[in-house]
Image (cartoon, helix red, strand yellow):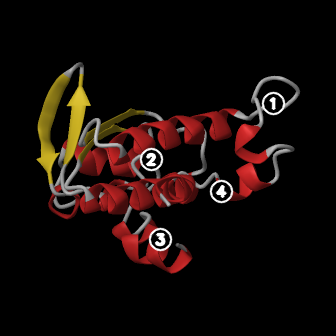
Amino acid sequence: PVLTEVLVVSRLQNWVCRLPQGLDTVVGEGVEVSRAVAQLMGLARAMLRLHQQRSRLLVLDCALDALDPESEALALELCFRSLRRIDGTAVVALRRPHSTTLFHAVCVLESGKIATGGYGRPSDLLRGSTAFHIMMKEAGLSNTGQMIRPSKIKAQA
């Protein structure tokens, strides 16, 4: 059951089912994977370690940037649900701000330091001219309606 859950959380279950030998397929020997699938495989390995109680901390450094924004947000939301069950914590670095509404707190860095007005809840940081608000505008996300919402993700999961 844990492996099945990890495959679902990492969104690899259907991909694995299509492999010639399923989970026993050796990847890289006639079975090539895209960068996005490789990133999801990395997430699956990390989630498996969490479930085996080797850690309760998950650190993702642009780990899903090969996915489109909605797929990235879905993978993160499913990952966060799994982390809540084990009372785990995630520290995530993102290149795109589209899924920041999924986080309890956001920290915007400039030159390795927290930017002025760059730490807090996403909804609070969108008010005023904070570094987060400026970053969102630069990404073409002028209002919160353009951001990926947990409610949209729950409907897809």
User: Which amino acid type corresponds to the residue marked 4 in the rendered image?
Assistant: Gln
- Give the residue at x 55% y 75%: 156
Categorize mark 4 by other alpha carbons within 10 Å: few (<14), some (14-19), many (20+): some
| Viewer-nearest residue: 61 or 50 | 50
At mark 1, the secondary structure is loop
- Give the residue at x 83% y 32%: 31
Q: Which residue is mark 2?
A: 139
- Viewer-nearest of discs 3 and 4: 4
Q: Is residue 72 left or right of residue 104?
A: right
Which badge, 4 or 2, is on the more N-terminal residue?
Answer: 4
Q: Position of residue 94 (x, y in %)?
A: 39, 39
Q: CA distance from mark 1 to mark 3?
A: 29 Å
Q: Which residue is mark 1?
A: 32
- Give the residue at x 81% y 46%: 19
User: Which amino acid type corresponds to the residue marked 2 in the rendered image?
Assistant: Ala
Per the rendering, the mark at residue 153 is 3
Q: Which residue is mark 4?
A: 13
Q: Determine whether label 4 and label 2 are within 8 Å by CB.
A: no
